[in-house]
Amino acid sequence: MNLFSVALILFLIMDPIGNISSYLSLVKTLPPARQRWVLLREMLIALSAILLFNFVGEFIFHVLELNDVTLQMAAGVILFFTACKILFVTKDNPRANLPVGEPFVIPLAIPLIAGPSLLATVMLYAHLEPSIPLMLGSIFAAWGAATLVLFFANQIKKILGNNGLIACERIMGIVLILLAIQRIGEGIQLFVKGL
Amino acid sequence: MDTIVSNAITFFLISNPIGNSPLVLAMVKRFPFEKQKHILLREGIFSLIVALFFQYLGAVFMQALHLDPFTVSLCGGFVLFVTALRMIFNKDEGLEKEEASLQEPYFVPIAIPLLSGPGLLSIIMIKSQAVNNSLYVSASVILAFIGVIGIMIAAPYLKKLLGERGLAALEQFMGMILGLISMGMLVRGASLFYQTLGA
């Protein structure tokens, strides 16, 4: 694992491009200055959740007596179903039923940016990757990139258009399913080796 | 020149637009005629873009995300399988009107994984590694997709031939065919995965 790969994977799971339309519809009633402030606040909340799981993950791992297989499989399966919700639009889609009013923690910071799938993945990588600077570096790189994307959400939407955004969401959904299948596959490989 | 044409024919056959056209017609049957042509042209261009992307950056993409080859087949198979189930059991009817417009096929499932499926993407990656001038492979991909897109745009005319009832029956039948195609991809992915277990 190198910094670029981990950062890219975390960035994809945060899925800022896919979240642009949800973010814009959440903050559309707020004045622009307030929007930027809300975005920064929500992103910082998301970052603290991610960092929390980066450090506390190992502790949870021991308390619950998990092993590598369970962690891999859980991260994969959660990501898999999250991606399915993105790819196959249904009524109970978290992006279709956004609450009204200014977002605070829910739903922008958690679960749209730092959802269960991201936190489980962070926990997994923090466990597999012994180098703390590498983990922190990739978390900050991914988080910074995601914040930039959402900061320029309006401009990106203007360039891509509504349909372009839907297309991006779908592509991201496919990529997330690929990642999830890889995680689950690695989990099964580990499980078979351990038999 | 020969390799360009023969590669183009290979890509065209693997993409299988002729076999796929009743399939995609069943998927877009809710839309008016002009809209159908528009959707299919767009999906054709999307799948061409994905094919060209995979030709140049496929290996880099797979490596950066630490993806094994089995994921592409399993993912394609899974997505098509869910689509097949939806076609057979008509899940769309439960959705609200506004949400139904969201259901317009965008990239998934027509562009990927039906037209640019795992089979096509992997063979494009293999060919571009075998031929030293990658522009030749790109030329064959573009040549193949001219044919694919042409047939895709022609697909809505089938509707005139079949009529409303014919189309409804076609959807059921094509759901079954799609189920078979998706199972094929899933099994291929599973056997690729099984090989990694031995190593």
Image (tube, coloured by chain):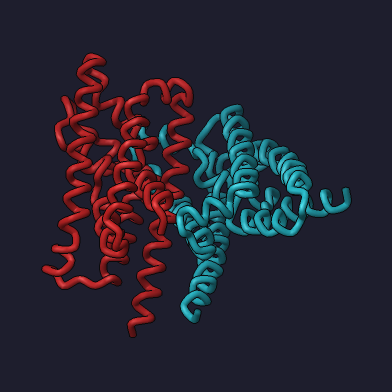
Chain colours: A red, B cyan
The residue at 33%/85% (across/down) is A195
Which residue lies most toward the right here?
Answer: B2
Q: Nearer the viewer, residue A77 or B43?
A: A77
| Residue B94 appearing in the image | no
**Residue A57 drawn above or below residue B20:** below
User: In the displayed structure, does residue A40 sit left or right of residue B42?
Assistant: left
Front residue (pair B199, B163): B199
> Which residue is located at x 48 percent, y 36 percent?
A167
- Quarter location, residue A124: bottom left
- The total number of labels drawn is 0
- A71 or A167, nearer to the observer: A71
Q: Residue at x 38, y 80 (%)?
A: A192
Residue that sits furthest to the left in the current view: A63
Residue plotted at (19% across, 53% down): A53
Q: Where residue B109 sits: x, y (%)?
A: 51, 47
Q: Position of residue A54 (x, y in %)?
A: 22, 54
Where does the image place residue B120, in percent across and percent down from the top left?
64, 55
User: Which one is nearer the viewer's eye here, B39 or B158?
Assistant: B39
Q: Position of residue A173 (x, y in %)?
A: 41, 46
Q: Is residue B148 visible?
A: yes
| Image: A185 above or below B143 | below
- Looking at the rendering, which quadrant does residue A35 occupy? top left
